[in-house]
Image: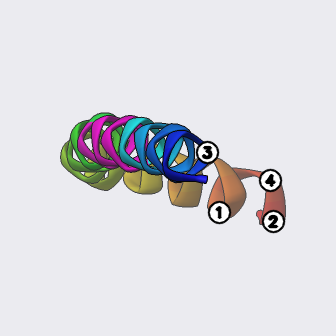
Amino acid sequence: MSLQLLAIKEIFVNFLNSLLIMMKIFKKILFMLLQLKPQMLLSRSLEMNYLLL
């Protein structure tokens, strides 16, 4: 029983660690996207205006 619990705990801890790493990577990507977004939005809106005219 205790071995099973240890295994489950190990899996859970590994899962949490991988989740944290994924969150960090996601934050980095999100930050990069937020930095890039203004230029992208500007060009997109200009394109849309050009298409609408």
Q: Nearer the viewer, residue 19 or 42?
A: 19
Q: Which residues are magenta?
A: 16-24
Residue 36, percent from left and from top: 28, 40
The dominant secondary structure in magenta is: helix
| 34 in the magenta segment | no
* Disc 4 and disc 1 in contact, CB within 8 angstroms: yes
The residue located at (38%, 50%) in the rendering is 16
Circle 3 sits on which residue?
A: 4
* Disc 2 and disc 4 in contact, CB within 8 angstroms: yes
Residue 35, percent from left and from top: 18, 45
* Disc 4 and disc 3 in contact, CB within 8 angstroms: no
Which kind of residue does numbered mark 2 sit on?
Answer: Leu
Mark positioned earlier in the residue sequence (4 or 3): 3
| Label of residue 52 in the image | 2
Circle 1 sits on which residue?
A: 49
Circle 4 sits on which residue?
A: 51
Q: CA distance from mark 1 to mark 3?
A: 62 Å
